[in-house]
Image (spheres, rainbow, N blue to C red):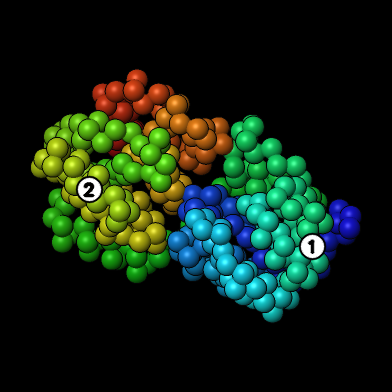
Amino acid sequence: MNTRGIIKDIKKAVIIRTDRIGEVLLCSPVIEAVKSSFPGVEISFVTSDYSRDIVAGRPDIKRVIIFSTTGRCPGLSHVFKLIWELKGCSFDMAVVLNPHKLLHLSVFLAGIRYRIGFDRKWGFFLNAKVPDRRDEARYHETEYNLQLLRAVDVYKEGILPSMPVMPHSLSRVRGILKRQGLSAGRKIIVIHPGSSNPAKRYPWEKFGIIARVLAGSGDADIVLIGHSDEKALCAGIGIASGQGVYDLCGFFDLKDLAALFQCADIFITNDNGPMHIASAVGARVLALFNKDAKGSNPSRWSPCGSGHVVLHKSFGLLSPEEVIEKARLMLKEKE
């Protein structure tokens, strides 16, 4: 089916991205593009349970459907459940943002009329598709996502990722910071030393030096964060850093992180999902990209927006002193 130029009356659309939090968040411009291109459209989102909170609670999302394609291959019962849910919603259009055989099959068997996606992994089940050239990293991931919509003559550019900060999350985070004893009136520097990819992790000993020096400057508290399985990593940094460093690893869910980043003066992090949450809520990010790590390319994955600093070097050549200097400059610019 040639869909170009004929899509007009879209009443229900589903956007699908079923992997990690950073990738899901970088799809949020597609939500805005679809919403503005088809007035009155009702939008649903299919994502993994792990990434649910990235889109849950958005006023422009009607429902969130859970389906994961990370880790083990989904069983047939999960696939049939997804097909049944998609079919029951009577969607007019599906936008599949991470190519996957089971996703392409599901939108086809659900009878969705317009099926948009990248032409790989059983792309023959789609009827509006573009070649997948994202590995060339000529554009940012957000632009690749928006360019996919050109398959149905939707042309939008420059929409930044967004994530709403929930008032109850902001209240909870402020309460945690107060109970932990962070000093009123001092700057807050949040550090995330982890990443799902070990090759993207700046050495924890160097993070320890950064935290100790910045905390020792006297006007900033350091908050260490991470997933619950990164507690040993954060504990090691906390012990090496000393006074003024608060290990809050495992304290926050994704909604809380968005609120925490709004309270922070700067966020120092590896290339990971929380980096994109921080930039999406307007925090200033100092991002460390390992030049030796496959796929860690700031041309495609850097934090969106202005005011960020990206250090793209081999981690063996990136000194703590260089990171500290950049962090101090960012703090000074914020004054």
Give me the residue at 39% from left, 59% from top: 254
Instruction: Identify the secondary structure beneath mark 1.
Output: strand
- Closest to the camera, between mark 1 and mark 2, is 2
Please state which amino acid type lies under the numbered disc 1: Tyr
The image shows residue 327, relative to residue 242, as above or below, that is above
The image shows residue 138, relative to residue 125, as above or below, that is above
* Residue toward you, 86 or 329: 86
| Mark 2 neighbour density, 10 Å: few (under 14) some (14–19) many (20 or more) | few
Q: Position of residue 144 (x, y in %)?
A: 65, 43
The image's mark for residue 114 is 1
Q: Quadrant of the C terminus?
A: top left
Q: Quadrant of residue 115?
A: bottom right
Q: Quadrant of residue 193?
A: top left
The residue where tag 2 is placed is: 232
Give me the residue at 58% from left, 53% from top: 27
Q: CA distance from mark 1 to mark 2?
A: 47 Å
| Mark 1 neighbour density, 10 Å: few (under 14) some (14–19) many (20 or more) | many
Left or right of residue 104, residue 226 in this image: left
* Residue toward you, 164 or 85: 85
The image's mark for residue 293 is none
